Every structure is written in structure tokens, then in C-alpha cells.
Amino acid sequence: MTELNKDGFIRISGLLSNSDLNSCVHSELNGKINYVDVKNFIDRIFLPTIKKNIPMIDDPRYVKFRYSNNNNSVDASTLHSDTYDHTESEILPIFTCLVYFDDTQVEIIPGSHRASYSEKHGTLEAYGNRITVNINAGDIVVFHCNLFHRGKGYDFKGNRRILQVFDVFQNGDAFAQYGHKFCTVLTSGGNRIKFGNKMLYNISKTPAIIDKVNFLQFLLVYNDLHYKVPLLDLPPSEKKDRLISYESWIRLSYDRISGNDPININVICMDTLVAQPSNYYFVLFLIVVLTITIGAISYRKYGIPENMDFIYKYLQFTSPLRVQSK
């Protein structure tokens, strides 16, 4: 299992039988599923299989899970991490565990789970290091929760069924060390996020387009700008020494399931800290706009202060567009 530590992920084949897999998905019908069956599969088959074959995950504790069929493309079709590490840890003992029910592909940036990765690799270099992993039905994939990855091979004419178990702490000690630092930011209520989700769902149907969007998204994600740009992020003081997860889709407590609930929702099995998006960056944006506006009005009314006149003399000398100082 050295590849899990070195590369940040591992793919294992042949551990789950067709009967095992069917026990999870047999109730799916018309976009709904019985989450009691799904959780039984997780607790009695899936995680015990992982525990048996990946010794470092010896007593797993998980926060939530999601079962989807193609429709997780709204937030998984571009490179992202499931958790963003703002602690000083080099490697987190927290994982995402997945089982695939259909053949598909996943794109991964090996090694990006290490905190030192971004110090050694610039944005373009990191993007160039991504690889595509071919997935067969029944495969298990486990990766560190902060590994950069995305789903590929969305087939909207067929199935792309996947079960994702998120925020899997490797044991009780890991949860005691990091559980209180874990915070989920609930961004699903923002209109900008809803619009973005709908747009990603539609463009993920066209690989040539989603690949270009993937690059632009990665520029933001890799530099921790993806929620600052839509003005929905927490201020730096609230992210310090925390593990941040952004939840841009519907959530439902396992205690409130009906037995026939929609697929592609986050089913919450353990309470952790949650937060609403802050107005911090929105207020900062307003301050910047107000400052620029006041500056522009002052210039039109009073001209340039004498001690700033040298700037205009320089512009007059260097620019083909002559700037006249008042």
C-alpha cells in the first residue's frame, strides 16, 4: 500500500462480488434509492473490505456518503479536492473511499495530497502532472481527501454509478486529532453556485469544453481562489488550522431519510462543524469598488495632486496616447 502514501491514491480490483454490488444499488429506480441499503453496504461490506486490505485504515469513521449516477458531474467534473487543508500537516489521515458500479475514468494528480506539493510545483506544472486512471465496474478507489482529482467519462446515455464515502478518518485517534478541525461550508444555497452547478452539468456532456473549463477551474482551485472569486469563502482567520470542505449540493441527515430518497445528495452520518459562506470577501469587494469610485470622482473634480504629476509626465513621454495633466 506504499502507493497510497506516495501517490495519494490506490485502485483495487476484484474484491467485491456482483452480489455485494447489487446489495447496494438494487433499490435504485427513477432517480431514487433506499439509503438504508446503501449504508448497510458501507458498514457491512465496503468499509470492512477496505479495513482488511488497507491496514492503515484500521477503524474507519466517516462523516457522509453520496450515491450518484452521472449527476455528480455538477461538482466533480473539474479538478478539486474533497477537503482543503489549512493545518500544518504534511499528510492527512483522512480519505475518500469510492466504489464504482460501471466502467469509467478518473483524472488524478499523483502526490498532490502532500502539503509540500504546491511549494515544489507551480500551477502549470501541477496541471501537467495529471494522469487518467481507467476504472472497471466493481473497482474500489481510495485516496487522501485533499488529493486533486475529477471524474471523467460521464455517459448521459448510460450509467455512471458511483458511491463516495467522504471524510473517512482512518481510526478513532485520527478523528480525535482532526475531527474538531473539520468544517463544512454550505454553499448550496447561493444562486451563483446553483448557476455554476447547472452550467457544469450541461458542459460536462461535451469533453472538449469541460477539459478547457477544467484548466480554468484548476487555476482557481490550486491557488485557493475558487470560492473567493464568487465571494463565498470564509475569511482567512476562520480557515486557519482547519480542514475545509465546500458542500455545493443538497444534504440530508441519515436520521431523516424516508427509505426512498433522491440520489446525488449528501447523506450525513456524523455531526461536524458547519458554516455558512461569509460576507467577508463581498464587503472587501465593495470597499475596493468604493475606493476606486471615490478616487475617480476626485480626479475628475480636483485633478491630480502636484506630488503625483510625475506619473503623468512619464505617461506622456512613454505612451502613444497622450495624457493631459490638468
Image (tube, helix red, strand yellow):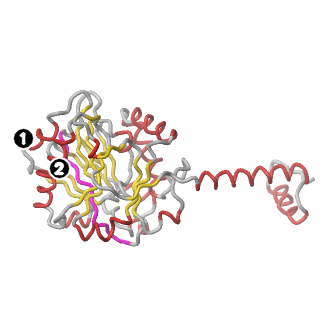
Residue corresponding to mark 1: 19
Residue 309 in picture, x, y percent from top left: 88, 61
Instruction: Tell me: 57 left or right of 293.
Output: left
Q: Quadrant of the N terminus?
A: bottom left
For the magenta stretch, what is the residue range? 89-101
- Residue 128 occupies quadrant: bottom left
Q: Amino acid at mark 1?
A: Ser
Up/down of 263 relative to 149, above or below: above
Q: Amino acid at mark 2?
A: Ile
Instruction: Tell me: 19 left or right of 216.
Output: left
Instruction: Tell me: 284 left or right of 252.
Output: right
Residue 223 in picture, x, y percent from top left: 48, 58
Q: Secondary structure at mark 1?
A: helix
Name the mark on residue 34.
none
| Mark positioned earlier in the residue sequence (1 or 2) | 1
Residue 30 in picture, x, y percent from top left: 24, 27
Q: Is residue 36 magenta?
A: no
Residue at position x 27%, y 46% in the image: 254
Name the mark on residue 42.
2
Q: Is residue 100 magenta?
A: yes
Q: Residue 321 or 67: which is nearer the viewer?
A: 67
Up/down of 143 relative to 206, above or below: below
